[in-house]
Image (cartoon, rainbow, N blue to C red):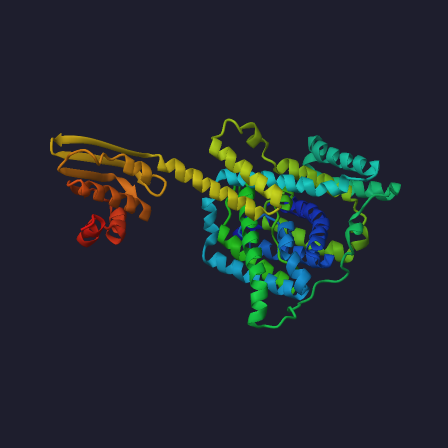
Amino acid sequence: MLSTLKQTWFFNIRGDVLAGLVVALALIPEAIAFSIIAGVDPKVGLYASFSMAVVIAFAGGRPGMISAATGAMALLMVTLVKEHGLEYLLAATLLCGLLQIIAGYLRLGELMRFVSRSVVTGFVNALAILIFMAQLPELINVTWHVYAMTAAGLGIIYLLPLVPHLGKLLPSPLVCIVSLTLIAIVFGIDIRTVGDMGELPDSLPIFLWPDVPLNLETLLIIFPYSLSLAVVGLLESMMTATIVDDLTDTKSNKNRECKGQGLANLATGVLGGMAGCAMIGQSVINVKSGGRGRLSTLVAGVVLLMMVVFLGPWVSQIPMAALVAVMIMVSIGTFSWSSIVNLKANPVSSSIVMVATVATVVMTHNLAYGVLVGVLLSALFFANKVGQILYVGSHSPNSHTREYQVTGQVFFTSTEQFVSAFDFKEVIKNVRIDVSRAHFWDISAIAALDKVVLSFKREGAEVEVIGLNEASATLVDRFAVHNDPKAVAKLMGH
């Protein structure tokens, strides 16, 4: 047990603690901003970020990944909060958590196998663009001090790692935030701070059961929102886990992550927080600041709460320019620049999927829509490509017989090619169709086989289908009609 604790919690103590501090500081303005988007008090987002991070540190399937209140989830809550209030949002958060736990037990995390690399790349690029766009309001119609502070922050972030010894000792984003805060306080620079975003809570969260009627009417109100929150939350969490897997060259347990997200949302709902999920931006900050284990996530959540409750006056003085610099670093580091360089070198279908995913997410600001479009396009391109891997050859062992050899996959995209490969006008007595090197996947393929056999029979030929594998034979036995005398007679007009 001690060895397990060391491998997952205490193998990187200094890196995890320092990374957790950076993430905690960066979480505060985002949690407040997402609360404002959802139409709730800032403490709802801050309590959610605390509880999500702490619970997921223990229950999640991806060490080092940060979960908290997110913009994608906040957007789904706007209508519910506006029409029914905070209590119904808390109830929806609880139901969202329950649905995610069920998804984990149903092993729905394994569906990530169907998300192609092009979709993941598009998701990453779109999120990088959205992170950068989210910083623009802080850089528009502001004084020169903001630009100077942001530039100084970026300088610290990118140049400090080049300094021998010191650069590896402290994470540059943390140095950036602390340095710019001290500069702003010492010189009395009048720029926007974290405190200007909203009032920080001054008390610890308490157990709070939603004050809603426990009846069918309430369920009908919250279920559509809970389902949307659960799907989007799991989708963003699974995608983020895949990205952190790549960054750290380690594997994660996707089904455990589903259950962990559900438990975290259950805890959040009873502590007065809004539903949340994994955050790619904060997760990238954590990894790039040296965070690798569960300790980094726990530190981020605990320190976040301690800072906003007990160090509120100090935290409120952090300049937004410092956090903007950190988030710009995240967007630059998150974007897959190689995907642009290799755009022409990659297959056209892969490039289209990647660009379509990016465009959909950026236009809708909904990550789920982008991933859905990407997955559908990937499936269509794959089906089209596999459908073309079909060959039908033939030869005549004698003047009365024609033998056809079918090689490849027969399903809905290849049925037209399959049917057109046969010569129904040839005057022949016997036709033998050898499908030992083929596979029939669906009822469209079986219907195509029926059409071929019946067309030959209409011309007076005897038809024999040989070599069906077990799976194809099962479909033929269930759905084919060419072996049913009554069906054949009816189709042939007798």
Give the residue at x 56% y 60%: 224
Q: Would you say residue 124 is visible in this rendering?
A: no
Q: Identify the image quadrant of residue 188.
A: top right
Tell me residue 216's x, y (percent): 55, 71
Q: What number of labels is visible?
A: 0
Q: Identify the image quadrant of residue 81.
A: bottom right
Residue sticking out furthest to the front: 493
Q: Identify the image quadrant of residue 361.
A: top right
Give the residue at x 13% y 37%: 429
Tell me residue 262's x, y (percent): 55, 58
In the picture, measured across the screen, residue 428 lies left or right of residue 392, that is left
Nearest the eye: 160 or 349: 349
Tell me residue 457's x, y (percent): 18, 43
In the picture, measured across the screen, residue 297 lies left or right of residue 137, that is left
Nearest the eye: 259 or 305: 259
Q: Would you say residue 332 is visible in this rendering?
A: yes
In the picture, measured across the screen, residue 247 lies left or right of residue 400, that is right
